Amino acid sequence: MVGTVEKAPTVVHGACPHDCPDTCSMLVTVEDGRATKVEGNPEHPFTQGTLCGKVSDYLDRVYSKDRLLYPMRRVGPKGSGQFERISWDEALTTIAEKFKATAAEYGAEAIMPCSYLGHEGLLNGLTVGDAFFNRLGATVTERTMCISCTSTAYLMTYGPTHGTDPDTFRHSKYIVLWGCNALSTNVHLWPFIQEARKNGAKLVSIDPVRTRTAKQSDWHLPIRPGTDGALALGMMHVMINEGLTDDDYIENYTVGFDELKARVQDYPPEKVAETTGLAAEDIVTLAREFATIQPSVVRIGVALEKQAGGGQGVRAISCLPALVGSWRHLGGGMLQAPMWPFPIRWDVVHRPHFIKPGTRVLNQWQLGRILTHEVPLDPPIKMLFVYNCNPVTQAAEQEKILAGLARDDLFTVVSEQFLTDTADYADIVLPATTQVENLDLMFSWGHTYVTLNNAAIAPLGEAVSNTELFRRLAAKMKFEDECFQLSDEQLTMEVLDWSAPVMEGIDMDVLKAQGYAKLKIEEVPHAEGNFPTPSGKCEFVSGMEVDSNFVLPAFRQGYETYEPGEPVDPLPTYTPQKESAHSNPELAKRYPLSLMSAKPHQFINSCFANLPKHAKLQGGPRLIIHPEDAQPRNISDGQLVKVFNERGTFQAPAMVNDMTRQGLVVAPLGYWRKLNPAGGTINATTSASFTDMGHTAAVGDSLVEVALASAQPSFGAQILTRLFSLFTRDKKEKAVGVKTKH
Ligand SMILES: Nc1nc2c(c(=O)[nH]1)N[C@H]1C(S)=C(S)[C@@H](COP(=O)(O)OP(=O)(O)OC[C@H]3O[C@@H](n4cnc5c(=O)[nH]c(N)nc54)[C@H](O)[C@@H]3O)O[C@H]1N2
Ligand SMILES: Nc1nc2c(c(=O)[nH]1)N[C@H]1C(S)=C(S)[C@@H](COP(=O)(O)OP(=O)(O)OC[C@H]3O[C@@H](n4cnc5c(=O)[nH]c(N)nc54)[C@H](O)[C@@H]3O)O[C@H]1N2
Ligand code: SF4
Ligand SMILES: [Mo]
């Protein structure tokens, strides 16, 4: 802590808990037991003293009048949001009795935990309930909605390496943001990119949409979604056939070059141009520049994976830096998510030894199908326990999820900070703390610093941290195992391997003194290969055994064995979208437009969407549609449209704009269903299918049709919508950006 011995106000080291790669180091000012200010920690080398626009108002979230502060029991119909306050003891007793009765009648597998990344901490985050539910014998829930596919593909090529340290991007000369809207989703990387550009680097953005990031890049390539694998293979065709490769690097530090060389012959630039919708000359230029302007680096976003062929796309992109030897240079190579060196003790966070062999594993991306019995289950799910997530807005097939949650024979518990669309369906709601009220230790998937979050204030009302929630539940269930007795302070010592070489020089005293510490990793890790793969080299032909059902241990809940799926080609290839005119012409006749969700600039997924300031800055729900698609449908800017397919419908005002490609409609994610007066949200229409590897959500692979909604807002309201969207667009552009210190 900083200044704890001084008189009030005190300043406490914190860390942003949200699901964002930047994991900002925060300073929280406390006066008389109340947090009065949050700001970025100016000492932190990566986040450099700024918080993004979402979290700079974090105290609006903490002290919101809508915070859930007491346990509650449902008193109205499911979904009505009518609750009455009860005591913690009553809540815990009711839940424990229900656990026992469900297990006795149907078996414990009729209980399903459902959690995701509302909190990213090592204590309170993704895995906080695993020990408890594994001990209970509940269904094991696989959580792979995000980054599991990208990670599998990246690890197949390079193994679990941090790759290019984002701190070194300032040394790059050619930066490719590939499916990454960094100005919204990874904003603290931007100053490093800008510094590189000041020193002459070129910034390229490969994105179907002219996003704020694409607009500010030197070159924007508006690729057709889901075709990135073809583009990377086409680039390799040029690099290899024009002799632009680093043959010494290939010879010494890679395996499978001959096979890759043969494979890329199927991807000449002219053919790739047809697939990707880009010009052949541009594909050639991109390949030549990436190969010859060194150090070159690729930063991939997460959205690339959310396609039927997303994994193979990332595999192909991953091969580029090894082929041209970018890894030799400071600031060259590739950045996926530098989380791999964090020495997280998976045996501690999951407690897999509790899992009885043969326990059922279900993937929560298909929650709608699971709850509506579309997936035949024995036993069916009778009890759902939701924490750290909001599946009604965030998971696909929304209408099935709603139907499932409305089942009378389903008992639902939701631990939350707010009464979300999901919490409205709970039988019991439990109040959760915010980050300023609990201790946590943070890893990051966007930089290589460990960050400590101290509790700055006491919990509001009767809110409890997730760790405390599971301690209380374990006590109620009389689970006497030692892991359920550990305090938060003890957990901080357990969840990481503090003796790992990367932790050299880092201990709790260091973290308490400065709030963060950088892992001991190499700045140029792969100048001479040294990849943590089976061969120790970059694997163009992967030696990792992967099939379509394989999931990395980080994304399991500790399970060991699984039913193998389809084999995954160990050599990168291009797999087209499943929902496209090419793969399914019949479907495409009915639903000719491809739908993409964009991460909202002012929310983190669905967090903040209910707070007035954030909602106002973000602007209301909208559907961005290209003029060539709007015109034949008689749609003009500001009119209400319905977006639909066989899965469902949502409505939003149209924004007719050529920032998207023809054939592609885009809707920002995160809006709450109950706060969208027009009805539904994007996930009413998205597909619950999986990607080619890692069981990730193939949300980007969804076709829809768009038509004018039957009821239209008044002409005045349409004009207002138009003005408002123009106003917010301009305002947001100005709000962009983080100061550079260097
Ligand atoms: N402000 C804000 N920041 C966030 C989040 C948020 O909700 N709001 N969410 C956080 C989370 S959970 C995540 S996973 C990350 C995601 O971070 P990103 O991956 O950067 O975010 P997305 O908006 O999903 O996608 C990035 C860009 O990829 C493009 N794209 C979509 N499909 C394709 C494709 O097939 N090919 C190519 N080349 N581009 C494509 C989209 O147009 C978009 O501009 O952001 C994190 N940060
Ligand atoms: N259509 C479409 N759907 C998508 C995506 C997409 O691109 N398109 N992206 C996917 C991706 S990448 C992701 S990561 C997921 C995100 O899916 P989620 O993780 O479900 O999304 P969040 O909105 O972050 O929801 C987390 C909830 O956790 C709550 N919460 C926060 N902190 C705590 C806490 O300490 N305790 C408890 N009990 N609750 C807490 C928040 O209030 C919030 O309501 O969405 C996926 N869904
Ligand atoms: S959401 Fe991301 S950028 Fe914003 S404060 Fe949190 S970690 Fe930093
Ligand atoms: Mo995500």
Image: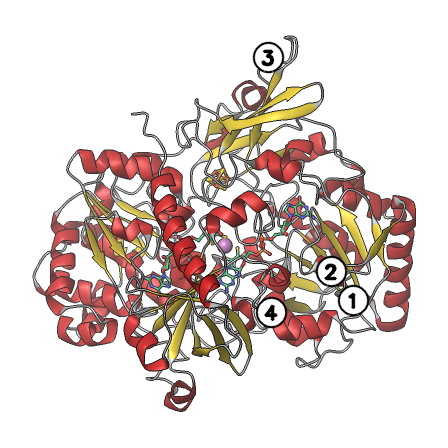
Q: Quadrant of residue 194?
A: top left
Total residue callouts: 4
Q: Which of marks 1 and 2 is nearer the N terminus?
A: 1
In this rendering, which labeled residue sits more in front, label 3 or label 4? 3
Residue carrying label 1: 78
* Disc 3 from disc 2: Cα separation: 42 Å
Three-letter residue code for mark 2: Asp
* Residue placed under numbered mark 3 in the picture: 3
- Using the image as rendered, state which of residue 558 and residue 139 is in the foreground: 139
* Label 4 sits on residue: 562
Q: Residues within 10 Å of mark 3 (few under 14, many from 20)?
A: few
Q: How far apart are marks 1 and 2 (CA)?
A: 7 Å
Q: Is 556 rendered above or below residue 52?
A: below
- In the image, residue 675 lies at what x, y percent? 61, 59
Image position, residue 47 (x, y; %): 42, 32
Which is nearer the N-term, disc 2 or disc 4? Answer: 2
- Residue occupied by mark 2: 424
Front position among marks 1 and 3: 1
Kindly check if marks 1 and 3 are in contact, taking CB atoms under 8 A apart as contact: no
Between 338 and 393, the one lying in front of the other is 393
Amino acid type, callout 1 = Lys
Secondary structure of the residue carrying numbered label 1:
loop
